[in-house]
Image (cartoon, rainbow, N blue to C red):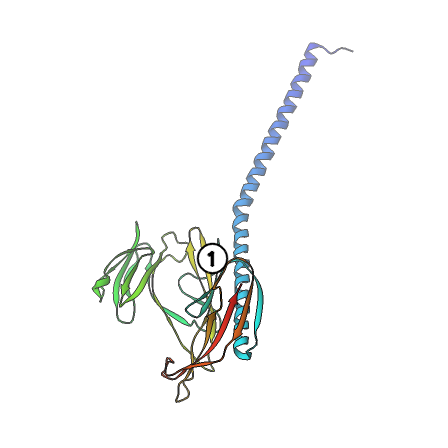
Amino acid sequence: MFLSRNSKKSNSHELYRKAQSQVLSIILISGILITVVGATYMWGVPLIEKGRTSSDNEIAEGFMLLLKEKVDDVAETGEQRTLSVDLIGELELREDNSLTYTIVTRGLNIATTAWVPLAGGMSPVQEDMAAVAAAGGTGTVNLNDDVTCNMTSSCGPANVVLSDCTDSSIDGTYSEGSNFILNDETYLVHHIDCIGDIDSQALIVGPEREKAGIVGIDEAGVLIARSVPAGDKFKTIYRLAYRELDDISTPSKDGYRIQLTREGNNILGPGQHRITLRRDENSKIIGESKHGGDLIGTKIYISMS
């Protein structure tokens, strides 16, 4: 049986129409898939990054709490302790009697304006601070106990202006990251948050000073943390600081201090490492406690490899 020419044309047209329909269906499905994948990426990646930030911070804090526990134990018992650790950041034994652990994340879990106490009580350090709103904020601020200024910020360009200061030597305009000297101490324009992804503040931070604790009330070791902007990421610094504890209830007002002492390397990068802690004999420095008594030191040697 033979088909007519018109029948052949009709079949060809029907096949062409079906082919077009299939192509359009593929294009529509592809478009929908691209849209869905794009939307999932836009919403999913920030959630993944947030989860990763939280996880990294939990790991870092847990490690520093363990390190604090081991230092305290060695100081009390005199027994040597060794830790095997897998670091995701940089661990440093600093000259200010503290251990710092710095990690880099895309998200922000810890405040950027001041040290946040995590364990061991109130922060063992204090800083002079002054702040106004980042975009056009103005006000009278106390830079320290003696000096006040009128502080104004702007975001085009980002800077702060100090004027009418009781110490006129610091009057001037300062950009983010710049510093100035007041009473032989350095003050830093810590950040001017014009974007609003930190705290929307223009912040000046002064020198750091140790605050002594009280025997029987405070702990010697305190874990504190803070974050600092690092490009499109953040550096979060976990700091285990050991402060002086003073016995103010006795006439002698003696002070006691765990002294962290380097033995070999003082910096470790990411990866597998060993940390060994051991105690030396106590020492005494006459009249060196913050309240005038003798300062009794317990030296803890820290070996990092």
Residue 262 percent location from the top left of the image: 47, 68
- In this rendered view, identify the residue nearer to me: 98 or 276: 276
Residue 273 percent location from the top left of the image: 56, 62
- Viewer can see residue 154: no
**Number of numbered callouts drawn:** 1
- In this rendered view, identify the residue nearer to me: 7 or 30: 30
Which residue occupies 45% across, 82% down? 215
Which residue occupies 39% across, 88% down? 252
Which residue occupies 65% across, 24% down? 18
| Mark 1 element type | loop
The residue beneath circle 1 is 108
- In this rendered view, identify the residue nearer to me: 166 or 196: 166
Which residue occupies 67% across, 16% down? 10
Residue 227 percent location from the top left of the image: 44, 60
The image quarter containing residue 141 is bottom left
Image height check: is 99 above or below 15? below
Residue at the far front: name it.
Answer: 264
Q: Is residue 189 left or right of residue 232?
A: left
The image quarter containing residue 29 is top right
Q: Is residue 115 left or right of residue 176?
A: right
